[in-house]
Each structure stands twice: as structure tokens, then as C-alpha cells.
Image (cartoon, rainbow, N blue to C red):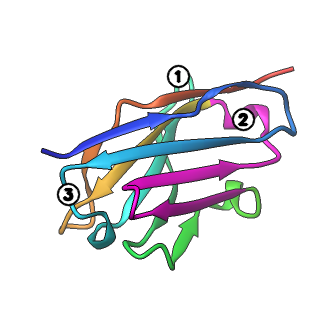
């Protein structure tokens, strides 16, 4: 059974950093592409970025390029999202999600809240 558990969210001031983690179990991480997706208050889901199974390829939405970095440690079955230079508009619940064979998410974590406010 696939399980994804995010952690690391919190309240920070603009310009500060956070690192989110996503602990995965129930599947072979090195074979699975993973997304980070966020949902701001009152808005729909927004794709943040994707990383391949080996951790060698990453792609990001334009609004986070140069500020956010995805990585993974397959030995620890953990996905990371390093977020630097945070802005109030980054405030959202952040989810990690596993991509299935269709290329769409087939498993989601419960999310972790990130609030950027002075």
C-alpha cells in the first residue's frame, strides 16, 4: 500500500526558507516520478514541480524557478522540496504525489501547510 507523508511546513517570514519532506513507502521510489502540488486558500491545485525516479531530472512551474529545488534520497525513500526566498503568494498546502503509469497522480499525501507572512 502506497503511503506518502509530508512534513516540514510552518510559518515563515517573506524571504526565509523551508524544506519540506515527503516520506514514501509501499512502492519503489527509484522507478517513480513524483510531483509537488500546492493549493492556496480559495484556489485550485497548482503543480509546483516534478522529479524523475533517479532524481536526475526536475522541472518547475515558472513562479518557483530559481527559488525551489526538488531532490530525493531513494535510500531513505524521501522526497524533498527546498524552498528559498519565500513569498506571501507561496502560502498554500503542499502535497507530494506519486505519478502512475498514465503520467497522472495516483497517490497523494495529506499535505503540509506553508504560510509566508510578516
Of labels 3 and 2, the one closer to you? 3
What crowding class fits label 2: few (fewer than 14 Cα within 10 Å), some (14-19), or many (20 or more)? few
Left or right: residue 105 versus residue 69 is left
**Residue 80 locus on image (x, y percent):** 54, 52
Q: CA distance from mark 2 to mark 1?
A: 12 Å
Q: CA distance from mark 3 to mark 2?
A: 33 Å
Q: CA distance from mark 3 to mark 1?
A: 32 Å
* Quadrant in the picture for the N terminus: top left
Q: Is residue 118 above or below residue 94?
A: above
**Residue 66 locus on image (x, y percent):** 76, 63
Left or right: residue 77 versus residue 91 is left
How many numbered circles are shown? 3
Residue highlighted by disc 1? 42
Residue highlighted by disc 3? 27
Is-magenta flag for residue 63?
no
| Residue at the limit of the structure toward the front, as seen here | 75
Residue highlighted by disc 2? 89
Residue 17 lies in quadrant: top right
Of labels 3 and 1, the one closer to you? 3
What crowding class fits label 3: few (fewer than 14 Cα within 10 Å), some (14-19), or many (20 or more)? few
Is-magenta flag for residue 82?
yes
- Helix, strand or loop for disc 3: loop
* Quadrant in the picture for the C terminus: top right
User: Which span of residues is magenta-colored?
Assistant: 68-91
Q: Residue at x 35, y 49 (%)?
A: 97
Q: Nearer the viewer, residue 63 or 29?
A: 29
Amino acid at each position: 500500500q502506497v503511503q506518502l507523508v509530508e512534513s516540514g511546513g510552518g510559518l515563515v517570514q517573506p524571504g526565509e526558507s523551508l524544506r519540506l519532506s515527503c516520506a514514501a513507502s509501499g512502492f519503489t521510489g527509484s522507478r517513480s516520478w513524483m510531483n509537488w502540488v500546492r493549493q492556496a486558500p480559495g484556489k485550485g491545485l497548482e503543480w509546483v514541480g516534478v522529479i524523475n525516479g533517479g532524481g536526475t531530472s526536475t522541472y518547475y512551474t515558472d513562479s518557483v524557478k530559481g527559488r525551489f529545488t526538488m531532490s530525493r534520497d531513494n535510500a531513505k525513500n524521501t522526497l524533498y522540496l527546498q524552498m528559498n526566498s519565500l513569498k506571501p503568494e507561496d502560502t498554500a498546502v503542499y502535497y507530494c504525489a506519486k505519478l502512475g503509469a498514465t503520467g497522472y497522480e495516483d497517490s497523494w499525501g495529506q499535505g503540509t501547510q506553508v504560510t509566508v507572512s510578516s
